[in-house]
Image (cartoon, rainbow, N blue to C red):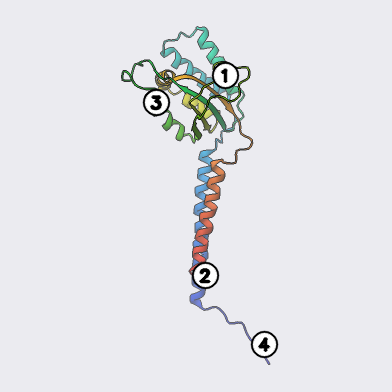
Amino acid sequence: RPPRSTPKPSSAASDVYKRQTLNNMKTWIILGAVYIGFFFWYTDMGGRLSQEEIQGFIKQHEQNIIDNGVFSNSEELQLRIDFLRRFMEEDNGRQFIMVNNIEMNKNPADVPGANPGESADQLMSRYMEHMWPNLLKRASHPIFMSDAVYQSMDLVGIEGAETWDQAALMRYKSRRAMMEIVTHPNMMDRHEFKIAALQKTIAYPVEPFGYYSDIRVIFGMLTLIVGLSIRLFLVSKR
């Protein structure tokens, strides 16, 4: 007996398969392009700060301070400039997290540009009106914010740190991104609102080595889930 021949798929079924395969490819191309675009926006690809960039930031920051009433030959200005210069020269081009411990001022003084009697929260809101747009467009944002539920449980070698109101972790895309915010011409005027709103604060940068909640990882997983869900939907319609 002659062997049975395998029936060829109909032309209509073949067209459906090709169309679904093409739609599947388009889905992954679009999702891939979206993720790549997000990755390059969220990641500073400029590497370490160059000496030209450092000098530019120093010059702008110095001018901002002078415009705020501090003379260029003052010791305060030189200490601040040296501090920022060292911060920029040690740049490695990577993201970092600013750790903030905050105690709000229960009775803040009046600040020019604000209404008399404004609370610490109102003054801080005025400061953040400048900060939020500049942070978000540079892929910098809070990753953790909380209110204190009790006083400090352990203190060694530090005085006056028994009580805090809030804690926050702020992600900066890079030191370049932070310096662009710090040297913004409107920063000095807004900074007075922050100073008046705070009783005390500590802020210091750390570089994460176990940052498992990185938005790039989360967004990548979501992109993969969306792509697989679309593929499953297309397969179910065959």
Q: Which mark is residue 121?
A: 3
Mark 1–mark 4 distance (CA, rounded to whole Å): 83 Å
Residue picked out by circle 4: 3
Disc 1, SS: helix
Between tags 2 and 3, which lies in front? 3
Give the mark, 1 or 4, whose residue is nearer the N terminus.
4
Looking at the image, do the residues carrying marks 2 and 4 touch, with CB atoms under 8 Å apart? no
Q: Residues within 10 Å of mark 4 (few under 14, many from 20)?
A: few
Asked whether the viewer can see residue 49, the reply is: no
* Distance between mark 3 and mark 1 Cα atoms: 32 Å
Mark 1 in CB contact with mark 4 (< 8 angstroms): no
Mark 2 secondary-structure assignment = helix
Label 3 vs label 4, nearer the camera: 3
Q: CA distance from mark 2 to mark 4?
A: 28 Å
Q: CA distance from mark 3 to mark 4?
A: 85 Å
> Pointer 2 and pointer 1: residues touching (CB < 8 Å)?
no
Residue 154's quadrant in the figure? Answer: top right
**What SS does tag 4 mark?**
loop
Earlier along the polypeptide chain: callout 3 or callout 4? 4
What residue sits right under mark 2 in the picture? 17
